[in-house]
Image: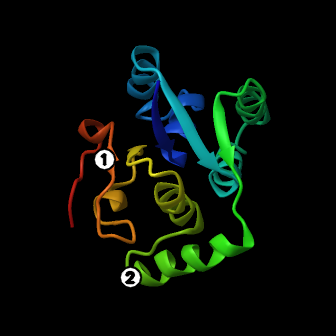
Amino acid sequence: MQKSLLDTGPIVALFDKSDNFHKKIYNFFQENNYKLYVTWPVITEVSFLLDFNKGTQLDFIRWLETGALQVIDISLFDISILRQFMDKYSDVPMDLADASLMLLYEKLDINKIITLDSDFYIYRNLNGKAINNLISELIPYKGR
């Protein structure tokens, strides 16, 4: 099974049926099988964005309970790497959730991501390598 990082946007779209990307994201996950990796900052961001409906928010939490996502912890040592990313991309700006996913790219060498965020076209790992967005065709705006 292939591995991929998973960003906030596609998770929100999956659970929010009113989201413009809901159907496309739902279909993507029906047609593809990836081992999905996230961090606690991503989970926190998703939970916050789904707060408009407690039932939807609980559906997301129940999905987590099934083991659908591999949640990777961030250590104290990792904070330095997060800061490096956030410093480097402060003009974008890079938030904690995005930095945490780039940290996983570094730590786990997973160079694929599922994201609706065009900022990932700009981000590079510490060796200057880009990350491959598996749903790039869904993003209407691909550059700055």
Left or right: residue 10 compared with residue 59: left
As measured in the structure, the alpha-carbon distance from the residue carrying label 2 to the one carrying label 1 is: 22 Å
- Vertical placement of residue 103 versus 86, above or below: above
Left or right: residue 68 compared with residue 55: left
Between residues 54 and 112, which one lies in front from this camera angle? 112
Q: In which quarter of the image is the C terminus?
A: bottom left
Residue 105 position within the rendered picture, expressed as x and y whole percent measured from the top left: 46, 55
Give the label on residue 98, or none: none
Q: Is mark 2 on a helix, strand or loop?
A: loop
Residue at image x 33%, y 70%?
127
Q: Which amino acid does label 1 sit on?
A: Asn
Left or right: residue 27 compared with residue 39: left
Give the label on residue 91, or none: 2
Of badges 2 and 1, the one in the foreground is 1
- Vertical placement of residue 58 versus 102, above or below: above
- Vertical placement of residue 107 versus 135, above or below: below
Residue at image x 56%, y 80%?
83
Residue 30 position within the rendered picture, expressed as x and y whole percent measured from the top left: 46, 15
Residue 54 position within the rendered picture, expressed as x and y whole percent measured from the top left: 79, 36
Q: Is mark 1 on a helix, strand or loop?
A: strand
Which residue is denoted by mark 1 in the rendering?
A: 132
Residue at image x 68%, y 74%?
77
